[in-house]
Image (cartoon, grey):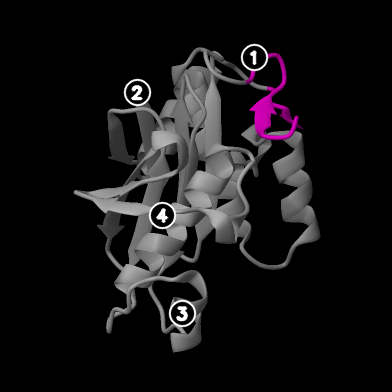
Amino acid sequence: MTTLYYMADIPPQSLYELLEKERRERIEKTARSEEGIAGAGLLLAYAAAKAEIRPPLNIIRDPKPRLEGQRSGIGGKFEFSLSHTKGLSLCATSLFPVGTDAELIRPVAPKLYKRLNIPFSNDNEGFFRYWTAFESVYKLFGGKYGLFDIALKEREGGFTGPEGCTVKTIREGEHIISVAGALPITFTKISATELESALRFWGN
């Protein structure tokens, strides 16, 4: 089973102390996307707490990101994938490898459709369904397949990718969200208020 937690709200800065070290350092170094970086990290803290993994959380890359002390690979205790875009933060979790991505729907140059062999769509929603699926599969396999070498076959609600992997895709407002991982795949929207209440409760 794969669960995708996502949040459109801006997370309160009072919770930044719960972020893992790598994410706190990223926020200190960047002047952009602070809310998205923090939001994805706080959703990770939320998902980890639900899995009875408590702070401090430290991310290790080998090559896929994993939490220090948690076994990586198929059958690992806690697999995750993070993403953020303007107005949205994501954290996908599973007992098995997982990848996720989201994008704000926006204008796309027609040449990109041809370059990526994506069927043209006037509203550009189709482009970002494919693009987020590509990114999700890339993350799922930890870069085993080149981003432009990933073959996708459309199916109801998403795509089938390399080695028979499943990608589920939804539209949330003006965003497209994709998750590649073990079935079933569920989507759960979290508000900043709910996130703060849960993290404060688990922190006591």
- Judging depth in this view, the residue of 172 and 50 nearest the camera is 172
Which-is-in-front pick, marks 2 and 3? 3
Q: Position of residue 201 (x, y in %)?
A: 45, 21
Kind of residue at badge 1? Arg
Q: Earlier in the sequence, mark 2 or mark 4?
A: 2
Which residue has dot 2 on it? 1
Which-is-in-front pick, marks 1 and 4? 1
Kind of residue at badge 2? Met
Which residue has dot 4 on it? 9
Q: Determine whether, in the image, residue 80 is placed left or right of residue 62.
A: left
Q: Tag count in the figure?
A: 4
- Judging depth in this view, the residue of 35 and 73 nearest the camera is 73
Q: Position of residue 145 (x, y in %)?
A: 60, 47
Q: Determine whether, in the image, residue 141 is placed left or right of residue 56.
A: left
Cα–Cα span, label 1 and label 4: 31 Å
4 w.r.t. 150: above or below: above
Which residue has dot 3 on it? 114
